[in-house]
Image (tube, rainbow, N blue to C red):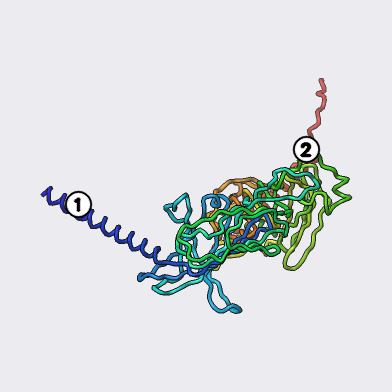
Amino acid sequence: MATDLKIRNASIFSLLLFLSFLLGSSSAATDHDLRITNAERRIDLSSHIIKVFLTLKVENKGTSPTSEVILAFPPAQIDHLALLKAAVSGGKKKKKTYTSLDVNPKLPDGPNGTKYFSVTLLNPLKANEAVTLEILYILTKSLEPFPSEISQSESQLVYYRDSAIILSPYHIEQQATFIRTASTKVESYTNVEPTNRSGLELKYGPYVDQPPHSFSPIIVHFENNNPFVVIEDLVREVEISHWGSVQVREQYTLSHAGARLKGAFSRVDYQSKPSVSGVASFKQLLARLPPRVNSVYYRDEIGNISTSHLRLDLKKSELEIEPRYPLFGGWRATFVIGYRVPLEDFLYESTDGKQRYLNFTFGCPMAETVVNKLTIKVALPEGSKNPTVVAPFTLEQHLETTYSYLDIMGRTVVVLEKKNVVPEHNSPFQVYYDFNPAFMLVEPLILVSIFVLFFLACIAYLHGDISIQKHKTP
């Protein structure tokens, strides 16, 4: 009996192993049968935030359908990958439509540490069918200043490293890469025939019949004096008051991530020769705030800063600010921005009427900035329960408790954190919570109680005799 049971278990194990082998073989065959018939990559190096637009025409030349397409990235780019999006395009040029696709990391890694991401198609790609994918990915901290130190009158030169051939797990029949630099001053670039340069654009290719995992390293050395604005730490505090407003306070720790300043800073040269002196520095920032803002303030550790301009509009508000001193490479500045917005613009009720939710914009209001670490703290009204967050990307989150004026039990604070944030992360997110309207009477009752006790104390003081009198002896 025991022998029969062992034989049966061994047979089941062998069958499962065989099935898993078949599934693995089928998947591998499907990946092998996919081919990229045409690939075009456009790399924008005009800013310190690198945007790459990749168009892939993928064809299934096998016999079985597949529901995913694999993207490959070299290990040097993974730590700097801030955003990765994929969409499928359809229609003609003038009436093209784009439908977003899910993108997720895929294991195991490829050869030489290649990292994979899986793009899930809307419908399985059948044999002899083709689909065109539009890929956008953004890289940060991928421009290396060289030289690493420059004087006040020198321009900033940077290195960019990549591959002339698109890294892919599939065979690519035809491909080309276009690199747009920030200026026409290009010190040097790697030549991989055919390579052409015209104005701001470098073209690598076309290259034909490149096998999977092909790689050809290139370096482009060019001038880039655009501000390398990096916010090392940003804390946005959003406090909801059901009495009519949402108060926002933002704490910035900002730095210039470009080539460091060599030598002393001369303000005379900086002001007298603005087109030559300090071309790689910056002294102004633009913050895009919500419409209908009020009670706006801007200050640093010393106090209020008057060098700011606020432009109000029905659709947006723009705040131009200027730190106390211009920022060169390696320099830092810390400051605070605060404002109020009407409650009805951001707080809504759910469709079932059981919950309320805050609809706010994630990300950094500053234009063209990279945020190393962004923390958003949403302080809910006292008495709020069961908070949930709906966001378009993955966030680290936890709950805290804080106390404000007239609070008894404390307020629930939803803390959201994300690293390596770029302007494309400026998307709406929602915080849902349960709230009993009876809690709105707590603060007025506390105030009324305080005033009643105060008046009772005054009456007792006026009508009572608390003087000390001498006792008369008979």
Residue type at tag 1: Ala
- Residue placed furthest toward the front: 193
- Residue placed furthest toward the top: 474
Q: Which residue is more in the foreground, 70 or 255?
A: 70
Residue type at tag 2: Gly
Q: Position of residue 283 (x, y in %)?
A: 79, 51
Task: Say if residue 190 shows up in the picture.
Answer: yes
| Residue that carries the numbered disc 1 in the rendered image | 10
Task: Answer with the quarter of the image where residue 15 lies.
Answer: bottom left
Looking at the image, residue 153 sits to the left or right of residue 91; the answer is right
Looking at marks 2 and 1 on the same chain, the residue that comes earlier in the sequence is marked by: 1
The C terminus appears in which quarter of the rendering? top right
The residue sitting at 78% across, 53% down in the picture is: 284
Q: Is residue 404 above or below residue 175?
A: above
Q: Position of residue 276 (x, y in %)?
A: 83, 52
Whether tag 2 and tag 1 are in contact, CB under 8 A, the answer is no
| Residue that carries the numbered disc 2 in the rendered image | 464
Circle 1 Cα neighbour tier, 10 Å, few/some/many (<14 / 14–19 / ≥20): few
Q: Position of residue 440 (x, y in %)?
A: 64, 56
Looking at the image, residue 95 sits to the left or right of residue 245; the answer is left
Q: Position of residue 403 (x, y in %)?
A: 64, 45
Task: Say if residue 124 shows up in the picture.
Answer: no
Circle 2 Cα neighbour tier, 10 Å, few/some/many (<14 / 14–19 / ≥20): few
Q: Is residue 440 above or below residue 34?
A: above
Secondary element at image label 2: loop
Looking at the image, residue 292 sits to the left or right of residue 348; the answer is right
